[in-house]
Image: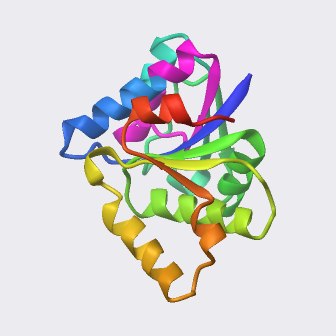
């Protein structure tokens, strides 16, 4: 079984299309026997994706630092919930347990995890595919900033294109391969 690490918000968002994206992604993963690897919370977009995957019969691995167990409300309905010592341990275990990475809308934690896994790829610590779904243009400003970094030669053009960008879940399903 392949595993996809999904980075997304621990908050529910005030845009229903992001919650729907998380649910549809979870269902898709279950239906295609792809294990969901994520941050281990039962709240926010993270919880939406996990619950949808579980309800559709999928496999879910949650990885959460001890310091966030109560704050993010660790998901107690998972087949596999691993509590680790730190965010660093969480990110390392997510990388180890995943064949590819996908970001959907989220806040600082989502961006932190996305940028760290991109940096690890830039440093050739892994060669796994990384993508984001730019639902409703959520990541437009971020992508513009990355192009700006490349224009100023602060980011190599090749590194910029290690991040595959899709405008919808359907586009990702059709175009992302791992």
Is any atom of residue 60 visible in this view?
A: no
Magenta stretch holds residue 106: no
Residue 27 position, x and y percent, is 46, 19
* Residue depicted at x 47% and y 62%: 111
Q: Is residue 93 left or right of residue 153?
A: right
66 vs 96, nearest the viewer: 96
Is residue 26 placed above or below 39 in the rendered structure? above
Q: Which residues are magenta?
A: 27-50
Residue 139 picture quarter: bottom left
Residue 175 position, x and y percent, is 54, 35
Locate the C terminus by quadrant. top right
Is any atom of residue 122 visible in this view?
A: yes
Residue 107 position, x and y percent, is 37, 59
Magenta stretch holds residue 34: yes
* Residue depicted at x 43% and y 80%: 148
Residue 125 picture quarter: bottom right
112 vs 32, nearest the viewer: 32
Locate the N terminus by quadrant. top right
* Residue depicted at x 64% and y 17%: 33
* Number of marks present in the image shown: 0
Q: Is residue 71 left or right of residue 36?
A: left
* Residue depicted at x 54% and y 48%: 131
85 vs 168, nearest the viewer: 168
Seen as rendered, the residue at the extreme right is 125
């Amino acid at each position: 079984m392949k595993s996809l690490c999904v980075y997304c918000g621990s908050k529910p968002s005030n845009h229903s299309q992001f919650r729907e994206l998380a649910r549809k992604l979870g269902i898709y993963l279950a239906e295609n026997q792809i294990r969901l690897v994520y941050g281990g919370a039962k709240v926010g977009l993270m919880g939406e994706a996990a619950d949808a995957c579980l309800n559709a019969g999928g496999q879910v691995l949650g990885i959460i630092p001890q310091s966030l167990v109560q704050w993010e409300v660790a998901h107690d309905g998972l087949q596999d919930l691993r509590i680790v010592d730190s965010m660093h341990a969480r990110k390392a275990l997510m990388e180890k347990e995943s064949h590819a990475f996908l970001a959907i809308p989220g806040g600082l934690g989502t961006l932190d995890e996305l940028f760290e896994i991109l940096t690890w790829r830039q440093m050739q610590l892994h060669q796994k595919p990384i993508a984001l779904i730019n639902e409703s243009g959520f990541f437009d400003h971020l992508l513009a900033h990355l192009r700006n970094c490349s224009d100023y030669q602060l980011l190599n053009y090749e590194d910029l294109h290690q991040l595959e960008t899709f405008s919808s879940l359907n586009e990702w399903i059709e175009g992302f391969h791992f």
